[in-house]
Image (tube, rainbow, N blue to C red):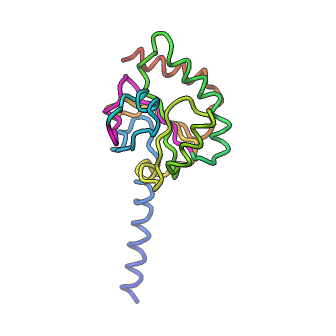
Amino acid sequence: MTAFIRLIFCLLLAFPAVSALAAPPEAGQAMPALTLPVPQDQAGQEMLGVQGKTSFTLADLPGDLVFIEVIGVYCPQCVKQSPGFKSLFNRLNKGKTKGRVAMFALAAGGTDAEVRQLASTGQYLFPIVSDPDYAAHKVLGEPLTPFTIVCRPGGEILYTHLGIIEDVDGLYQQIKALLDKG
């Protein structure tokens, strides 16, 4: 009986540590290593500069910052947020910020067919990357969606946000300030 109680005690101690390690990343941390499939569409591949590849890492992306929006293909909050992010994408692709931010959506659980369908709606102007087996989503600590990450291509996380970002202009200003810092 004593051995059983010790086993239970050890398991209880182990599980909080495991769940703490599996939390979504936060600003100030290093981005976990991700190897992602290239977007299916040629335009998306060109936007990310990954033409001719089958997969990519964040370090492969051009620009000074990487903007990742973790989405669910059927996520109503993601649909609600998309118009603001379309505007953000357009603003980031003008003037001094043009070419400095690689922006894409990671469709957690999204199959290639679901991603093609989502892309055909025009809901997202930026590339959508499929993650049908939740592999990248798991590496990111399985965040709820939408989950936004802004990091450097080398992995330094500068900004994260869970849920809808109401102040997209404020986010744009933050991104501009991060770009100005270099």
**Does 140 appear in magenta?**
no
Residue 168 position (above or below residue 112): above
* Residue 132, x across and y down, in percent: 48, 53
- The span picked out in magenta is 53-71
Q: Residue furthest bottom?
A: 1
* Residue 23, x across and y down, in percent: 46, 50
Q: Look at 60% across and 26% down and name the residue there.
A: 86
Q: Nearer the viewer, residue 175 or 11?
A: 175
Q: Nearer the viewer, residue 136 or 130?
A: 130
Q: Quadrant of residue 181?
A: top left
Q: How many dots with numbers?
A: 0
Q: Look at 59% across and 41% down and name the residue there.
A: 118
Image quadrant occupied by the N terminus: bottom left
* Residue 85, x across and y down, in percent: 59, 28
Q: Look at 41% across and 72% down and name the residue there.
A: 11
Q: Nearer the viewer, residue 56 or 171?
A: 56
Residue 10 position (above or below residue 54): below
Q: Residue furthest top?
A: 95
Q: Quadrant of residue 156?
A: top left
Residue 35 position (above or below residue 132): above
* Residue 58, x across and y down, in percent: 35, 35
Q: Look at 61% across and 23% down and name the residue there.
A: 87
Image quadrant occupied by the C terminus: top left
